[in-house]
Image (cartoon, helix red, strand yellow):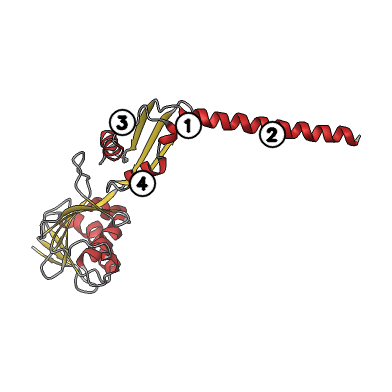
Amino acid sequence: MFYNLRIKQVLFICFLAVVALLLYAAIGRKKNSFAHAVEVEVRAFKDGKKLISESDVRQTLLRSFGNTLEGTELGRLEIERMERVLEEDPFVLDAEAYVDQQNTIHIKIDQREPVIRILDNNGGNYYLDQDAVKMPPSKNYSARVIVATGNIAPYTLDFLKKKKNTLHDLYTLTQTILEDEFLTAFVQQIHVTNSDDFILIPLIGDQEIILGSVKKLDDKLNRLKIFYQEGMPYTGWNKYRSINLKYSGQVVCKR
């Protein structure tokens, strides 16, 4: 009985060794085989648009690796480096690369989604995304987002840490607007005056909405919503030239 047990153990060990050798050989053959194709997918926004195209992604890989990757020995592919290179692009939020069983390299790209476009007095022209990351204008698509103009502080990596900073305040205001369905559909532009007052330009009507600073922002925007939803239908969208929310508890209108 003991003898039979030893034979079973030896056979099991031999079986594991054979499996390991076959696996090692398969891995070796895989590494020594070549990439047949590269498939790139850029996940579009909800409206079907893309800031970066599949062609742009291929060009980035070509510049970084010096070839088209098709025909490259799989053992020489630098998958993690490919992902890092692609994620250095300002339009790319996340890049995933892998090789399937047919030796096809798959590249999947998630785009950064802009929430506001900045056109400041110093000639700045850029987007900020949902994580406050700066993005240049895209040659492929002009995102339909809120446009901000005027006396806006220059972008710096730490702008959100600065307390007295018009870009910080602008980003806070934008995020607050985008959290509200009515305001998101209502506001098309934010202008910052030389005295650092924030002015909203609505999509409907010719008036300007003076917020002043972003202090007590929720209260100001709530007064604005009540005024437009309850007062404007009776007076008409174009009756007032300006609507001032700077004064506590009031909505001051001028014709």
The residue to which callout 2 is attached is 16
Q: Secondary structure at mark 1?
A: helix
The residue to which callout 4 is attached is 84
Q: Which mark is residue 31?
A: 1
Looking at the image, tell me whether mark 4 or mark 3 is earlier in sequence order: 3
Mark 1–mark 2 distance (CA, rounded to whole Å): 22 Å
Rendering coords of residue 170 (x, y %):
23, 62
Looking at the image, tell me whether mark 3 or mark 1 is earlier in sequence order: 1
Q: Residue furthest bottom?
A: 248
Q: Which mark is residue 68?
A: 3
Rendering coords of residue 62 (x, y %):
28, 35
Name the residue nearer the viewer: 212 or 42: 42
**Residue shown at 8%/62% (left/top)?**
255
Mark 4–mark 2 distance (CA, rounded to whole Å): 37 Å
Which kind of residue does numbered mark 4 sit on?
A: Arg
User: Does residue 250 appear in this view?
Assistant: yes
Q: Residue furthest right?
A: 1
Crowd rating for badge 2 (residues with CA inside 10 Å; few <14, some 14–19, many 20+): few
Which kind of residue does numbered mark 3 sit on?
A: Thr
